[in-house]
Image (tube, rainbow, N blue to C red):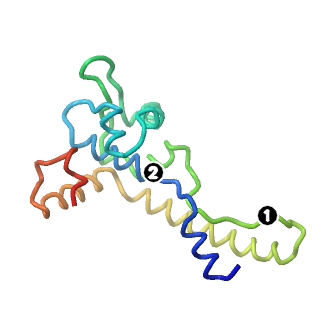
Amino acid sequence: MTFSQLCNMVCYMKRDRRLSGVLHVLLHMAEQDTPVTSEVLAKAMDTNPVVIRRIMAGLRDQGYVRSEKGHGGGWTLACDLSKVSLHDIYSALGSPSLLAIGNRTESPDCLVEQAVNAALHQAFHDAERLLLSRLGEVTLAMLNADLHNRLIARGDLHDHLDNVHAS
């Protein structure tokens, strides 16, 4: 396998998009005055409502959202957006792996593999530490403010959940 082929393979590896998806859903919810159903959120995320309910239940356990049952029920935010960081949400998701690449472990007695893994381990550790630090600096309120700035720039601040996806 050539280096170019390896790079292409890494680019196509499945990436965990839960953090991005949950942040997306939370911003949609921040734009609503009423509860949002799992079905509406699932449509916005192009996923199944069961997936949304499973993820939201974990956020509810952490106190970030609450659910209301019955007619007119759904999910609402239960937190101050300025007090919740992206790191908090990442942790609520169970701290999924941040990097799609990892060390080779097929030949643990191989000295070459040991040398490569030692170097990569430190690089991965440093990258993850930097990323987690940055996630701790950004709040949901900052994301929401950025969304509002983008809506204003596009001229449609009053269009929310149904139109945020328009280009």
Q: Do tag 2 and tag 1 residues touch (Cβ < 8 Å)?
A: no
Q: Which quadrant is home to the N terminus?
A: bottom right
User: x%, y% of residue 8?
Assistant: 57, 74
For residue 10, side relative to residue 141 (left or right)? right
Q: Nearer the viewer, residue 48 or 59?
A: 48
Dot 1 amino acid type: Thr
For residue 65, side relative to residue 122 (left or right)? left
Q: Which mark is residue 5?
A: none
Residue at position x 16%, y 57% in the image:
151
Numbered disc 1: secondary structure: loop
Of all residues, the one furthest to the top in this rendering is: 70
Q: Nearer the viewer, residue 76 or 130?
A: 76
Residue at position x 21%, y 38% in the image:
32
Dot 2 amino acid type: Leu
User: x%, y% of residue 161?
Assistant: 22, 44
Q: Residues within 10 Å of mark 2 (few under 14, many from 20)?
A: some
Vertical placement of residue 120 versus 157, above or below: below
For residue 7, side relative to residue 119 (left or right)? left
Vertical placement of residue 100 versus 86, above or below: below
Q: Nearer the viewer, residue 141 or 147?
A: 147
Q: Which residue is identified by label 2?
A: 19
Residue at position x 33%, y 39% in the image:
41
Q: Residues within 10 Å of mark 1 (few under 14, many from 20)?
A: few
User: x%, y% of residue 19?
Assistant: 45, 51
Q: Which quadrant is home to the C terminus?
A: bottom left
Residue at position x 55%, y 44% in the image:
94
User: x%, y% of residue 153?
Assistant: 13, 64
Q: CA distance from mark 2 to mark 1?
A: 28 Å
Q: Which residue is identified by label 1?
A: 105
Mark before the other along the chain sequence, 2 or 1: 2
Numbered disc 2: secondary structure: helix
